[in-house]
Amino acid sequence: MQLQESGEMYLETILILSKKKSVVRSVDIAEHMNYSKPSVSRAVGLLKNAGYIIIDNNGFITLTPSGHEIASKIYERHQVISMLLMALGVDDKTATEDACKIEHAISDKSFDAIKAHARSKGMSLSYK
């Protein structure tokens, strides 16, 4: 199943929150993304049905291996593109906002070329 940009954003958000908190709940996602609880509930249900997340009896959300793979890919793209734009002199806010748009549209081939070019120029691509 091809995931839409919004689904990728939710998975990335779950990954980010799981790095900060021991458990992730729908309310945490809603607060982080500034979305309504019903919108998040619907999206979480779709992600669960598609096999990208698991929700336990306490409402705690974890990424499945396929969900984690997608979330990690999007998160890496966001971090690398943000860092690259900032290295080019773009202010942090604009770089982060632009990276959020680019991360979903760029092909694997183009992203790999960007990473290779950045590394060839001695740019560190480490991120948390």
Image (cartoon, grey):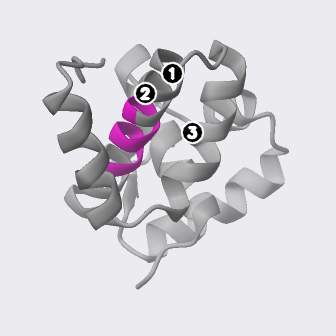
Determine the main secondary structure of the stretch shown in magenta.
helix
Which residue is denoted by mark 2 in the rendering?
A: 84
| Left or right of residue 74, residue 108 in this image | left
Q: Does the magenta stretch include residue 62?
A: no
Label whose residue precedes the other's in the sequence (1 or 3): 1
Q: Residue furthest bottom?
A: 1
Q: What residue type is labelled 3?
A: Ala
**Which image quarter: residue 79?**
top left
Alpha-carbon span between mark 2 and mark 3: 9 Å
Which residue is denoted by mark 3 in the rendering?
A: 99
Do labels 1 and 2 touch, CB within 8 Å?
yes
The magenta span reads: 73-80
**In the rendered image, the vertical position of residue 128 relative to residue 11, given as above or below:** above
Q: Which of marks 1 and 3 is in front?
A: 1
| Mark sitting on residue 88 | 1
| Left or right of residue 9, residue 87 in this image | left
**In the rendered image, the vertical position of residue 115 relative to residue 95, given as above or below:** below
Front residue of 61/59: it is: 61
